[in-house]
Amino acid sequence: MEKYFRQYDRCRQNEKPFCTHACPFHVDVLDFQTKMEKNNYNAAYKTFRNAVGFPDVVAALCSEYCAEACPRKDLDQSVQLNLLEKTCVAKATRKDPTDYNVPLKKRKIAIVGAGISGLACALRLAQKKYEVTVYEKTGRWGGMLWDLLTSELFLADIERQLQFETYDLHFNTEIASIEELLDQDFEAVYVATGKGGSSFGVLDQEQGHCTIVKRDGAESTAMAVFAGGSLTGKDPIRAMADGLDMAWAIEVFLKTGRLEYPSAPPACRSASDPDKLIRTEAVSPSDGCIYTDEEASLEAGRCIRCQCDACMKYCDVCAYHNKWPMRIRDDIMSTVAFSTSESMMKKTPAKRLMNTCTQCGLCEEVCPEEIEIGRMLLEARRSLHKQGTLPGAYHQFWIRDMAFASSEAAALTRRAPQPLWKREGASQGTPTDTRYAFFPGCQLGAADPRYVSEPYRQLLEKRPDTGLMLRCCGIPAEWAGNEALHDEEIGKLRKEWEELGRPILILACPSCRKHLKEYLPEIETTSLYEILEQWCGETKRGDSAAGLGASEVYSIFDPCSARNNIPMEQAVRTLALQAGVQIEELPKGDLHGCCGYGGHVSEANAEYAAYVTKSRGALSDKPYLTYCINCRDIFRGEGKPALHLLDLMYGINPIDSKLPSLTERRKNRVRLKETLLTEVWRETMEKQQPQSKYRLIIGAEVQEKMDQMKILEEDLLEVIQFGETSKRRTFDEEQGTYSCYRELGHVTYWVEYRQNDDAYEVVNAYTHRMKIKLEGVWNGRKVKADL
């Protein structure tokens, strides 16, 4: 986990936008623009004043350093921030500062010079209730402002901002040497004597324009002296900002005894979203001076709010939970730490969150620092699984599904079939070499056996040396955080591949290919679609697509696991065109997240899974053409028309065909194995015995609910059988139905049913994760409390 936590040291989440970085005062421009867009001038004024000290003066003198940094500069025109500032100070009606009742600090500070830099420093220190004394050699304050602005403007602003502060101001008092101040027990001095003024030898010291003067050689009574403002060559705006910075440096010294002269900030690492840069001409004020309310809203709205927010824009976890990555990291750290703690604090702030990541990998790709949010969340699942605190119900169905797909009932690993004459001719000849092996994945044949049998027949026509590996790749175990089970599945897969003679695997599922590339890099793989394009050449399959909506225009939806796999993506597009359909790309091609299937997130948060699917479905109003069966099924389940490429190529299922139920998907796997054994290897598959003597009648509405809650018919059979044999059930006389339940793994299954001749009619079924503690007595007799 530490590896992923350390990545966040590079996170740009808190990086200031370009304009704020360029501003000497580092005004919170994002906050200011948001308030100005709403015409909330008083709130915007407060944001501005808190940053600059004297807002009216700054608005009048602002040199617009931000304009050069604005990304709009090269597109149309930089946001007119100074005009917005002037509008703000002109329209704000509550301009008096807040009078805080803060205890005085008995620390004495001297400021030499009552120009704009010295006054800015005095204001900030006085606001923090230090004992501030200002010395000015002339008879007035303001310094260079008398040459730059009307006295009415800047004098009113200075007096307004200082009205609640306590300070001593000495006019017509020239400080000839630092020793004068040393004798008055000042602990820090800011020299702001202006351009050409006396520096008292403070400039260009080892640590900047600052030094420490000792009293009688005693370190404990040392006085820090800082110099800044126009004395150091700065323009009026930077001189004023310098005064505020020196207040910070003085406070650091008073608290720590350390000299720390303000330095230039590091290079800006923020980022702007090019999608937001739409040409929008700058707004000119109709009166030539300040904006009207409507004009202010329009100009503030031109700001694209530069911020490194690719994660919030592209990552479904961040967007749905409205949490920035560093908050997610903190929640994960707390969850992993408290999962082994006996603390009474909330132990699981992110158990559900970490199980909602679809593992699409987009976060790492769009992040300029390549921070792996998804990898961190997966590692957190592994950590909790090792601790035994990961909710098993989140992944139970998928682990069982993986086990079935790789079981004797559905799995099939065979070398390339021998030619027919060899099969019928006793023992002559040797087994056909297996140069290739078709690996369709576990979900393709579950959706419809023809998705596997039809391509495999065609592969055998072109390359008879193509074997078969019909099983799961093991990715459900990885998504469940179960490393031991995942390693076991990978080991089995490697062994089967080696027994086949280490063939090149032809994979139909992009997720399988990505997974095997990471965990079994020694296996050479290629995609089914690249092979079909290469081996089948220019074969036209338009007739096969007849009746499937082939005349429509389809948007190609590239699965997230195929992202940046250019050969596969190009092959898919070639095959689609050969099938006789028109295709168009999504707005950002394959730069999008998962369809909602990845990571098996639906059990952890069904609403989140639906949100992800609907977000992907909204990328185009056209029906989707995809080459991942999970994408097709997920979209169809949420009402988005979608076809699999193999539907078009082999005329398998129309776009409005009914999706199989979860139980039917298991039966399809068994049927696929039987079909291949019979038609390809001329073998007879041993028939499986029914698991229960009970027969179920399930209506369409109940079946839909079962699929949503991941309930199989075999689950209901087991629950009913338990209720019937143990008699641990209740009877509703009014409805004529029985209700019973049983824990299967980490999930409690409930069934409401009625007897119907030799069958059981299922009226309702549902699940929950609560455990029920039983009494040892049921209906007045002792029973075994075993669910």
Image (tube, helix red, strand yellow):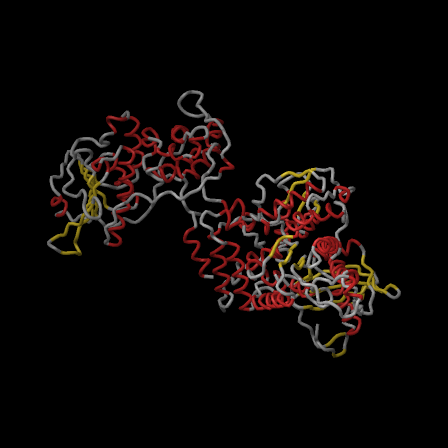
Left or right of 103, for residue 273: right
Q: Residue at x 29, y 34 (%)?
A: 237
Q: Residue at x 62, y 59 (%)?
A: 504
As drawn, 34 above or below 363: above
Place of residue 400 in the rendered image (x, y in percent of width and height, measured from the top left) = 67, 65
Give the residue furthest to the bottom: 782
As drawn, 289 above or below 455: above
Place of residue 216 in the rendered image (x, y in percent of width and height, measured from the top left) = 10, 54
Left or right of 256, for residue 274: right
Place of residue 171 in the rendered image (x, y in percent of width and height, measured from the top left) = 17, 34
Is residue 448 visible to us here?
A: no
Give the residue furthest to the top: 287
**How many discs mark residues in the rendered view?**
0
Q: Residue at x 24, y 26 (%)?
A: 147
Q: Residue at x 35, y 31 (%)?
A: 64
Q: Which of the 4 quarters of the picture holds residue 269?
A: top left
Is 666 or 61 nearer to us in this picture? 666
Q: Which of the 4 quarters of the picture holds residue 765?
A: bottom right
Is residue 572 visible to us here?
A: yes
Picture quarter with the C terminus: bottom right
Left or right of 112, for residue 604: right
Left or right of 680, for residue 370: left
Give the residue furthest to the right: 757
Is 383 or 536 nearer to us in this picture? 536
Is 404 or 458 nearer to us in this picture? 458
Q: Which of the 4 quarters of the picture holds residue 512?
A: bottom right
Is 69 or 491 nearer to us in this picture? 491
Place of residue 473 in the rendered image (x, y in percent of width and height, measured from the top left) = 63, 61
